[in-house]
Image: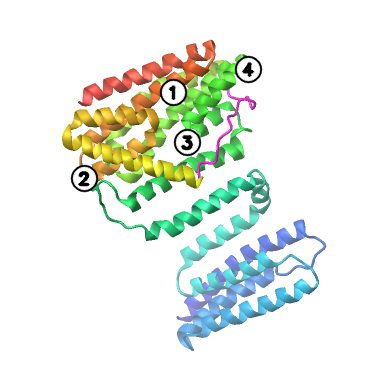
């Protein structure tokens, strides 16, 4: 490394270390003004420069120079934290960990990985600055939510690498790893909507609750809003808005899920999903713009955490059964049998049949049959949502929601007949 490159690397490290140190010093002075500052702007700058110099000496003096510097720094910080514990001072653990990370960032700069170092630095600063928000956010989740999320993460991390990646059974329909991957995909998407609802859905109004409900569970949203309309009939218009939004967003959620499994389906499904979404979007736009609805907080539905292990196993079993029925019906009855399976499965679970058809299309390149089956399932699922509204909702809710769902279903039927 020539002199000009070394000076450039030291300058970059100085800036990155100073950025992290500035955030740490600001945090300590604002949140712990009466405690001794463990490390601030100058210290973090020195640590970044130390990492860059040790990286330089590793290339010019000895290959273990950087590793030795990291070990010495880690031991020094550990001794410092041990001594602080005698004074019963709990501050400094995050700062110490970030100090070691700053040393490694300096090493990245020495090895000409400036872009990685920059991205890592900004990520660290953002995470540190979000400390108050993270603490407030964590209080919104129950102990059961955290326990189930950790349980699911642990089971996924252990099971997924161990399950065999080979097909077996009739028609080679059952692939344990692929089945579990579908569980992870659907549960992850549902959990994202669940987290969003818990964080902002109930505070941001019924419109956003409907959108997020379509991601988390459109069936749960439809059921909750239908019952809410019976409890408080004056809010039937707000409930109708949430139901239509959830049912419309559900179509786009399925589009993203099947694209994640087999990307060629996106181009084939996109125009039909747009067409089927038109009635819902027109209704929601008209209702929000003319009546200024969507600001109610009382009608927010309550969702169950979707990451329960028992629920995951149920979906895995349902997905495995449906993909077997899809392959068997295609083998014995062709497209007609698959249409029947798609319609019946869509009444139970749209995700399972959509992912099953996507997987089958990726194996056999049967994109057209998969698109037709997914649309049939979407129509069946829309009809099922209409039945829920008709059974549980008020008369005003039925008059608002059922015509929109009926038009959506008729468009879907027309599209299926057209592509057939």
Give the foreground label among 2 and 1: 2
Percent coordinates x, y for residue 233 in the rendering? 60, 14
Q: Quadrant of the C terminus?
A: top left
From mark 4 to mark 1, how far is it between C-alphas? 20 Å
Q: CA distance from mark 4 to mark 3?
A: 25 Å
The residue to which callout 4 is attached is 232
Q: Is residue 368 visible?
A: no
Segment colored magenta: 292-307
Mark 3, secondary structure of its residue? helix
Secondary element at tag 2: helix
Q: Main secondary structure of the magenta part?
A: loop
In the foreground, 364 or 69: 364
Find residue 171 and name its label. 2
Q: CA distance from mark 2 to mark 1?
A: 33 Å
Can you identify the residue that label 3 sits on? 215
Q: Earlier in the sequence, mark 4 or mark 3?
A: 3
What is the distance, in whole Å, between disc 2 and disc 4 at their CAs? 51 Å
Residue 120 on image: x %, y %? 52, 62
Precedes in sequence: disc 2 or disc 4: 2
Badge 2 or badge 1: first in the primary sequence? 2
Q: What percent of the width, then of the height, locates residue 125?
A: 60, 58
Q: Residue at x 43, y 45 (%)?
A: 313
Q: Nearer the viewer, residue 67 or 384?
A: 384
Q: CA distance from mark 2 to mark 3?
A: 33 Å
Residue found at x 29% / y 40% = 323
Residue 300 forms part of the magenta stretch? yes
């Amino acid at each position: 490394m020539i002199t000009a490159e070394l000076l450039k690397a030291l300058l970059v490290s100085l800036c990155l270390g100073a950025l992290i140190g500035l955030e740490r010093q600001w945090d300590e002075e604002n949140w712990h003004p009466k405690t001794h500052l463990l490390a601030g702007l100058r210290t973090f700058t020195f640590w970044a420069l130390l990492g860059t110099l040790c990286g330089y000496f590793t290339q010019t003096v000895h290959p273990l120079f950087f590793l030795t510097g990291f070990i010495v720094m880690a031991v020094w910080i550990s001794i410092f934290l041990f001594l602080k514990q005698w004074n019963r001072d709990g501050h400094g653990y995050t700062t110490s960990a970030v100090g070691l990370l700053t040393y490694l960032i300096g090493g990245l700069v020495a090895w000409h990985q400036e872009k990685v170092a920059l991205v890592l630095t900004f990520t660290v600063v953002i995470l540190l600055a979000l400390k108050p928000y993270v603490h407030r956010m964590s209080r919104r989740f129950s102990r059961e939510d955290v326990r189930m999320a950790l349980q699911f993460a642990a089971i996924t991390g252990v099971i997924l690498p161990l399950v065999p990646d080979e097909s077996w059974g009739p028609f080679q329909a059952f692939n344990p790893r692929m089945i579990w991957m579908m569980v992870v995909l659907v549960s992850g998407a549902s959990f994202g909507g669940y987290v969003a609802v818990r964080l902002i859905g109930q505070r941001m109004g019924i419109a956003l609750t409907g959108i997020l409900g379509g991601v988390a569970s459109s069936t749960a949203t439809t059921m909750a809003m239908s019952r809410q309309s019976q409890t408080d009939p004056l809010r039937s218009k707000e409930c109708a808005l949430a139901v239509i939004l959830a049912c419309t967003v559900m179509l786009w959620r399925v589009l993203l899920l099947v694209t994640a499994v087999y990307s060629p389906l996106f181009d084939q499904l996109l125009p039909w999903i747009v067409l089927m979404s038109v009635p819902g979007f027109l209704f929601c736009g008209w209702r929000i713009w003319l009546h200024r609805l969507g600001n109610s907080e009382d009608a927010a539905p309550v969702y169950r955490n979707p990451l329960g292990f028992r629920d995951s196993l149920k979906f895995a079993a349902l997905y495995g059964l449906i993909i077997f029925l899809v392959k068997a019906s295609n083998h014995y009855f062709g497209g007609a049998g698959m249409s029947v399976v798609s319609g019946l499965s869509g009444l139970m679970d749209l995700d399972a049949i959509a992912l099953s058809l996507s997987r089958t299309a990726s194996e056999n390149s049967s994109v057209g049959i998969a698109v037709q089956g997914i649309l049939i399932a979407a129509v069946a699922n829309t009809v099922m949502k209409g039945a829920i509204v008709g059974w549980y909702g008020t008369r005003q809710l039925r008059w608002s929601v059922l015509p929109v769902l009926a038009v959506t279903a008729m468009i879907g039927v027309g599209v299926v007949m057209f592509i057939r």
